[in-house]
Image (cartoon, helix red, strand yellow):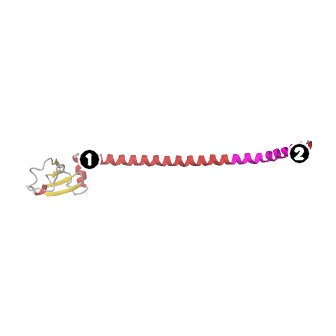
């Protein structure tokens, strides 16, 4: 009986020594696993942050671009000053130099339809008249197109 208890005692000691010799290996392996998990989390967080930043940059770019397009469109529609209209027409047609024209906006087509110069005119079109050069231009600001050009009779 004493022999069995001694045998048990040594078996337990041997198991303890084996488990104690494996403990540093297991602890080292646990640390490696923990480090790799931390690195995976860090990598995933970096990817998420990159995607968020790229999305924010893209959104800001679209907002700025869209805003500038809207502003340009608004400016084009609202800029009806004579100098602006003459400049717009001057890009398409050669205009008389050193002469400021008279500009009128068509508000009704009642009396103009039977005149050949106004056959393609619409409400909102501009009539630009250069009295000294005897020249009239029908201009559509919405499309930035010259609809007609005529020489004035005396």
* Secondary structure type for disc 2: helix
From the image, state whether disc 2 or disc 1 is nearer to you.
Answer: 2
Q: Residues within 10 Å of mark 2 (few under 14, many from 20)?
A: few
Q: Tell me which numbered mark, 2 or 1, is placed earlier along the sequence.
A: 2
Please identify the residue farthest to the front as the structure is shown.
1
Highlighted magenta segment, given as a residue range: 6-32
Q: Is residue 83 left or right of residue 63?
A: left
Q: What's the CA distance linking mark 2 and mark 1?
A: 103 Å
Residue 51: x, y in percent? 50, 49
Q: Is residue 137 magenta?
A: no
Q: Is residue 131 left or right of residue 12?
A: left
Residue at x-position 84% and y-position 44%: 12
The residue singled out by tag 1 in the image is: 77
Residue at x-position 53% and y-position 47%: 48
Q: Is residue 128 left or right of residue 31?
A: left
Name the disc covering residue 7, or none.
Answer: 2
Residue 84: x, y in percent? 25, 48
Foreground of the two, 127 or 8: 8
Foreground of the two, 25 or 82: 25
Residue at x-position 26% and y-position 47%: 77
Residue at x-position 61% and y-position 49%: 40
Q: Residues within 10 Å of mark 1 (few under 14, many from 20)?
A: few
Q: Is residue 42 left or right of residue 149?
A: right
Q: Quadrant of the N terminus?
A: top right
């Amino acid at each position: 009986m004493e022999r069995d208890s001694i045998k048990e005692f040594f078996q337990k000691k041997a198991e303890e020594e084996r488990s104690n010799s494996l403990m540093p290996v297991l602890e080292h392996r646990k640390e490696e696993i923990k480090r790799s998990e931390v690195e995976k989390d860090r990598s995933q967080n970096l990817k998420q942050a990159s995607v968020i930043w790229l999305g924010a940059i893209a959104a800001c770019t679209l907002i700025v671009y869209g805003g500038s397009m809207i502003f340009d469109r608004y400016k084009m529609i609202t800029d009806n000053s004579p100098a602006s209209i003459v400049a717009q027409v001057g890009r398409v047609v050669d205009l008389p130099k050193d002469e400021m024209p008279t500009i009128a906006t068509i508000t009704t087509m009642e009396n103009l339809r039977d005149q050949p110069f106004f056959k393609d005119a619409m409400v909102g079109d501009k009539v630009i008249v250069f009295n000294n050069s005897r020249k009239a231009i029908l201009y559509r600001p919405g499309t930035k197109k010259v609809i007609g050009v005529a020489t004035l009779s005396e």
